[in-house]
Image (cartoon, rainbow, N blue to C red):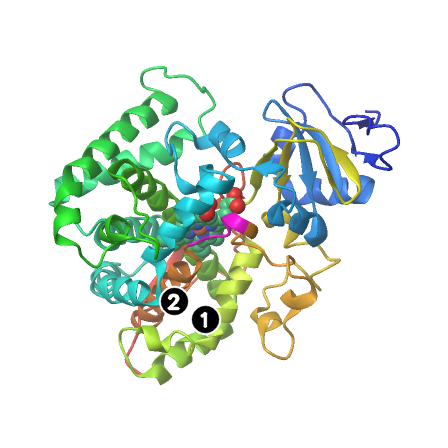
Amino acid sequence: MAPSVLAPPPPGSGLKPVPGVPGLPYLGGTLAAMRRPFELARERYDAYGAVSWDWLLGQRTVTVQGPEATEAVLVNRDKAFANGPAWSYFIGPFFYRGIMLLDFEEHLHHRRIMQQAFTRDRLRSYMDAMAPGIAAGLDAWEPGRDFRFYDHVKKLTLDLATDVFMGVELDRAEADRVNGAFIDAVRAGTAYVRAPVPGLRWHKGLKARKELEAFFYRHLPAKRRDGGDDLFAALCAAETDDGHRFTDEDVVNHMIFALMAAHDTTTITLTTMAYYLAKHPEWQERLRDESLALGKPVLEFADLDALTGVDMAMKEALRLVAPVPALPRRVVKDTEILGYHVPAGTTVVVTPLTNHHMAEWWPDPERFDPERFAPGRREDKVHRYAWHPFGGGAHKCIGLHFAGMQVKSILHQLLLKRRWSVPGRYTWPLDTTSLPSPKDGLPVRLDLLENR
Ligand code: HEM
């Protein structure tokens, strides 16, 4: 198909038009982007460079590639790129007024308050609170030959969320109901039929949102009154130095959003680590030795920096499979990216998943090589935005330290309790049509660890 430009730049502006191959209206490159994102990204970059356009999910979409273009969009100096209208298209009805969907002044206002729920002291108490749940969850992992790692870790992180995020005593039936509603709300974002047809995903998502709201509103008065070590209590209590606090409605919206933001992302990170540590048993042993050397069954806040191998392996997993594969933005006023004219109304997408595989910035990018993050090498330092699994700029993940804490706490206990492996020729079938996950649930052989 012939190349075409997105829009002619204003005369005399000196800007270039964004090139691309739009493909079929509405659909464009959507299917290819979902099914073979890495190959497509490479082809586009080779043909058009860092900034190109096509139709994606019914919208004229500019995809930016590489650290320079990524930085321009995420840093957003000109305030030309908005989150709300872009993300709302996918998850708006279910994650209504979550902080990631707010913009500019209003976003900053909420972010300042929310920051109070992620201070060092708060993080320390979340970490202490999650340790017993991790131990109980992992002890229930039965050794066997067809242990679906992804499915089990997803359940574990969801159960932990009930403890550490909500801090509400629930019987099993109620916990399952809340978790089920939450799963429906998340799934709805990837519905093909984007209308409330009873029985289909979108409809279930709307119903789930109502249930989650009712749940949090029911528990809110007690949280405000009694406080606690959980995120729910922290959001209720959060207050800036100049006295700004969240309303009840804000707390409920932010809780529902934070659950979503934390759950799949941490699950994917742990699953990717498990996959590569099974493929590279020498690394699994190295991390196990590190955990054994610590001499503690449970990781404590002060130990976080001690597990340097786990830290490098986590960074490498986040590089190889960025849990949030694409970050959409809506252009709210005419702007430019690296000298290309991008008119208001365009959708722009930053692509952590594929950027992290660009050979221009990452030597031997498909290789699992945690040492690339070792002090002597630090390949991520080649550019501030070469490695950006947590995004950047005003919306940079507020939970990134929380995520590190949770992933390391789980992995430390897991390394001490279990060993896992996959057959030498196994390659996981990674599904990239939504958030990345293994189509087969990552079947591993799970063994109890003999005492050493
Ligand atoms: C490895 C795990 C995680 C990854 C890879 C990740 C990734 C991201 C990314 C890429 C963004 C930016 C989205 C954008 O710019 O459009 C983001 C935002 C956010 N994340 Fe995370 N996240 C993780 C874990 C968590 C956890 C554990 C929490 C909560 C405890 C959390 C809470 C949030 C929130 C509230 C935002 C919105 C921030 C804002 O808009 O100001 N995330 N995350």
Q: Which mark is residue 87?
A: none
The answer to which of marks 2 and 1 sits earlier in the sequence is 1
Give the residue type that dot 2 points to: Lys
Tell me where residue 41 appears, x and y as whole percent: 70, 43
- Crowding at label 2, few (<14), some or many (≥20) Cα neighbours within 10 Å? many
Judging depth in this view, the residue of 164 and 84 nearest the camera is 84
Task: Identify the element where label 1 is drawn.
Answer: helix
Tell me the SS state at disc 2. helix
- Write down the quadrant of residue 372 in the picture: bottom right
Name the residue nearer the viewer: 227 or 278: 227
Q: Nearer the viewer, residue 161 or 445?
A: 161
Q: Residues within 10 Å of mark 1 (few under 14, many from 20)?
A: many
At label 1, the amino acid type is Val
Image position, residue 429 (x, y; %):
52, 46
Residue 397 image position (x, y, % from top left): 47, 52
Toward the viewer: 404 or 98? Answer: 98
User: Could one spot residue 40 in this view of the protein?
Assistant: yes
Q: Is residue 247 magenta?
A: no
Q: Which residue is mark 2?
A: 408
| 147 sits to left or right of 391 | left
- Looking at the image, residue 11 lies above or below residue 440: above
* Residue 421: quarter of image: bottom left
* Span colored in magenta: 394-398
Q: Is residue 429 visible?
A: no
In the figure, 81 relative to 411: above or below?
Answer: above
Give the image location of residue 212, x and y in percent. Answer: 25, 34
For label 1, the residue is: 310
- Magenta portion: prevailing SS class: loop
Callouts 2 and 1 close, C-beta under 8 Å = yes
